[in-house]
Amino acid sequence: MAKNYWIDNDDPDNLDPISSLLSEWSDPEDEEEEFRSDFFQGLSGRRKKAAFLLMAIWGIVIMLHLVAWGTWVIVALTTVFTLQAFRLIFAQPNPIPEPLSEEDLKQAPSVSLLVAAKNEEAVIGKLVQQLCSLDYPTEKYDLWIVDDHSTDKTPEILDRLSKEYPQLNVIRRPAGAQGGKSGALNGVFPKTQGDIIAVFDADAKVTPDLLKRVVPLFDQKDIGAVQVRKQIANESLNFWTKGQAAEMALDSFFQQKRIAIGGIGELRGNGQFVRRTALINCGGWNEQTITDDLDLTMRLHLANWKIGFLNHPAVEEEGVTSAKSLWHQRNRWAEGGYQRYLDYWRFIVNQPMGLGKKFDLISFILMQYLLPTAAIPDLMITVTRHRLPLLGPLTGLMLSLSFWGMFTGLRRIHNEDKLGFLDIFRLAWQTLRGTVYMMHWLIIMPCVTARMSVRPKRLKWVKTVHQGTPEESFQA
């Protein structure tokens, strides 16, 4: 029979991720006091830092337009990042170990699967059935569902399933419990026993052999986490879901290549596996961020853990089906991505992460976050002064690398090593359509940067509907 718990928000066993992190990396008294001030921590500090960053980006672009040597600065940057792009293109993904054999399963580590759910009656039953039917010894893994005060039929469904699956544990949080998804995960974590902690969204779909393929990656002692490739389950629905499928292929390409050159592997929330000791070392999940996965990614790397990536099998999830839903979701992702750099920039500068990781971070901060924002003043000056865009070479490099990465990612997903003409044409069309879809980031990034300078978003639960399937997600 599954156990049912109520989380006590005053439980001293619950993790305080920020305090734990600061206790590990705190400086002497003066520097620690500075870090704890509003400018260096919290929503107020993020707003000030975002405003400073926005002014710096605009100021630098304007300056480069006014000085005679501005063009040469861009040429030099483009040359450096072109070399980095070639490193990514020609890097060979790290080899993936063989899945666990029946003999290996006898010594396999234990795994705890975590799901934070709120009003998930349409999908929670299917997820529980899949996660409780994995090809892994039942005594070596358990499932923990945190029902965050659902008001639909989710509690009844979980009660029924708990009688059927002995490894299912249900925790119910009361109304008004704080911390959203991160709070739910932090609350259940002390009750788990797994050597590896896995996190899934309620709409996830997995294959029975998932654990047998993920667990061997943790044989490397410096691997603190593994992200499984995500795949859009409703890809064929419309332009937006097809674009998200291509975007996931692009992400898988960059994940594998960045890890291969000694760069940063990243967690993506759904389908993430974290070594228990690494999670404790990093202080659990941060309840003061809107993207707990990106925040944990940064803290793992700052603590000198590596993050691996598993390309096959994938974890499926439903993509958002409208432009409005996509806008809200990507705004949350963009702001969460910014938050980790604003929160941990001093640690990134001072911690001995290694030159490879730091240069990889700089490359992707520039291409993903700074360049789209810098394009606004560049375009304005281009129009008013009737001259060519100064950032054209960097923008061209970014788009070219994105196109190649998306094409290669789609090819690898479908295991198409030998391509005929029609195969190449089909993949090229998918890539072109995906590239057009990706243009939304060029709008979202500068908008998010500007809005964060004025008013960061508050944390709250927002309901998202996928093809008539209600899904709760921790959104801002």
Image (tube, rainbow, N blue to C red):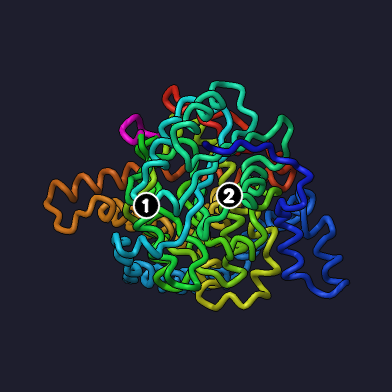
Q: Residue at x 45, y 56 (%)?
A: 227
Residues marked 1 and 2 touching at CB (< 8 Å) = no
Q: Which mark is residue 72?
A: none
Kind of residue at disc 2: Ile
**Identity of the residue furthest to the left in this view:** 420
Which residue bears the numbered disc 1? Answer: 136
**Measuring 70% from the left and 56% from the top, which residue is drawn there?**
17
Q: Relative to 261, does residue 404 appear above or below in the rendering?
A: above
The one of 256 and 100 positioned closer to us in this rendering: 100
Left or right side of 156 for 424: left
Residue 303 screen position, x and y as percent = 61, 70
C-alpha distance separating marks 1 and 2:
52 Å
The range drawn in magenta is: 234-240
In the figure, 416 relative to 178: above or below? below
From the image, tell me which residue sits under label 2. 376
Percent across and percent down for residue 367 are 50, 59
- Please provide percent x and percent y for residue 52: 73, 57
Q: Which is in the foreground here, disc 1 or disc 2?
A: 1
Q: Is residue 385 visible?
A: no
